[in-house]
Amino acid sequence: MATTFNTFQTSLMAITNTGAAAITAILRAEKLMDQVKTADASILLVKTSVLGGSVVTRVNLFSTTSHLLYTGGAIVNYTLFDPNGKMIASGVVSGDTAEKPASF
């Protein structure tokens, strides 16, 4: 029995391919469950993707100014759940810079 318990304890503490221990995921799930039990709680699941882009510096030989341009974009997938796990809303939002000047 002691060997089985030690094996179980080791598996809970072992770092998985996600970079965290299994016990950490369990504790996070418990904390999330406590939050979901509150009135009017919702769960928002968001997955993001970044589209590759580039940065271009344009220099005018007859002026001392230069322009920094960037291209790229992002895609966001979202799903909104109620406390019982029923999906309320979902969708995809995308954005694209279309070589807009940088603003700092």
Image: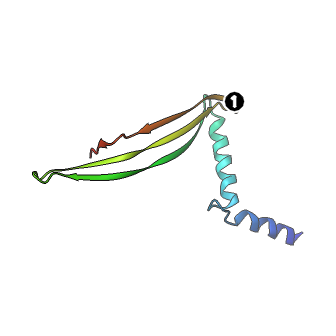
Q: Quadrant of residue 46?
A: top right
Judging depth in this view, the residue of 74 and 98 nearest the camera is 98
SS class, disc 1: loop
Q: Quadrant of residue 83?
A: top right
Q: Mark 1 highlights which residue?
A: 86
Residue 3 position (above or below residue 70): below
Residue in the image at 26% along x and 53% along y: 57
Measured as percent of width and height from the top left, residue 2 is found at 86, 71
Image position, residue 102 (x, y; %): 28, 45
Q: Residue at x 44, y 37 (%)?
A: 95
44 horizontally vs 11: left or right: left
Is residue 97 rendered to the left or right of residue 44?
left
Q: Is residue 10 above or below residue 34?
A: below
Residue sitting farthest toward the front: 61
In the rendered structure, which amino acid carries the disc numbered 1?
Answer: Lys
Q: Nearer the viewer, residue 36 or 64?
A: 64
Identify the residue at horizontal 37%, vertical 46% (top origin). Answer: 71
Q: Position of residue 1 (x, y in %)?
A: 90, 69
